Amino acid sequence: MNTPQIGNYCAPNKTNLRRFNTANGESKNEEWLQIVNVPCKIVDIRHKNKTETKTETKTEPETKTETETKTKTEPETKTEPETKTETETEIEYVLNSFTSASIRQFVVPEEEFNKEFYPLTVDEESGILKGVCGYPVEIGVSEFESRNKVTEIEQKLKKFVKDHKTTHPALVKVIEDKLFQLLQTQGAPYVKISEFKEYKEGKKTLTALERFGEQVFNRNSRWCSPTNLTHSEYEKTPSYPAPLGIRPKDFALPSEVIETTKELVMQIAYFKNVDPEARKMLLAIIECDQCPPRSDHCCLYCGQCVDLNDYSSSYMSETNYIEICHRDPNDRFLTRNMYWGHGDCNRRQGGYSEADRIREGFSLATRNLELLSKDDLTLLIAMIAKTSL
Ligand SMILES: [Zn+2]
């Protein structure tokens, strides 16, 4: 293996707790900064001098130099034990994990680095990280930069929310209630750090049937590596009982999160009855001021417009008028899958995909054609005639 350099990439083979760097040394608390298979960038390499003085002192070096000119005592001086100051250099790698903010860094001593990390390379032409394990898609190094863009859009949206609570309350509510919750992943509450340590120190005893540990992070970034193991497979991983990653359907790269967030904000901007000034502001946040205008945004399930005025009148109620819907609840956080629709329509679709519902409805219809009106049938026949089979 080549010696790692600053700017190289690597990935951990196990999840581990690390302290992050602060202005006054390392943080007091540990965090899951090292997550199995999540790429890390080597941002610095520190060479610390670890000075060891061996104390076998017999002669002073000064006396030797004096006698040097007179007699040649080379063999003597060489064999003679002397004060030997051995300067050993200890190497530490400063890493930034893909799932952290770009300023969050942690230090790994060389020995641990060699044991717990594997090297990644970058394809020069495509900029794609090679050697990455556990991800469903390829990761370009530019995704490390895209993290900042995600933060930037989030901050702008937060500012919009803060500044327009009274001027555009319904819009603010939509963004506040629905959009922000989406940017983070969900999951089961996982093992507490204190419990993890107790387990590692052998202080935690488990009964034969007790399930301990949880592979899915409750909240982590969407670009954390996805995990989908059985509990017994998970128990055999070197990380156990530390978490491994996020649910596969939560996974999206920063560039994908940007695209999806932009699309969802775009749709909000084109809800029916959105104030034109507010629309302009939202479009500016997603840098879409110059994008071609759209017509009112419609729910994909019923085909009807999503009206902000209806949201205004219902946002204090239990049931939501507007919700973020998934065309397929098991597909990812991508523009093809996410849209704003009616809460009622979302509930009607249930936990099924649109495709499931269509097949079900079609099967039901073909067995009960007498329930379709003449208009329905005429429409159906006309649509089939237009479709090339
Ligand atoms: Zn609808």
Image (spheres, rainbow, N blue to C red):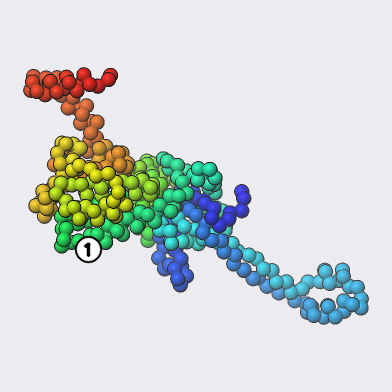
Q: Residue at x 49, y 50 (%)?
A: 11
Q: Quadrant of residue 294?
A: top left
| Depicted 294 relative to depicted 169: above or below | above
Q: Position of residue 383 (x, y in %)?
A: 19, 23
Q: Residues within 10 Å of mark 1 (few under 14, many from 20)?
A: few
Splitting the image into 4 quarters, where does residue 89 fall? bottom right
Disc 1 marks which residue? Answer: 163
Q: Relative to the observer, which residue lies in front, 104 or 18? A: 104
Identified at 24% across, 35% down, the residue is 353
> Which image quarter: residue 303?
top left
Of residues 67 and 204, the one nearer the viewer is 67
Picture coordinates of residue 138, whole percent (x, y): 45, 42
Quarter of the picture containing the C terminus is top left
Q: Percent x, y for residue 72?
A: 91, 73
Residue type marked 1: Asp
- Provide the secondary structure element on which disc 1 rests: helix
The answer to whether residue 273 is above or below residue 353 is below
Say whether residue 17 is visible.
Answer: no
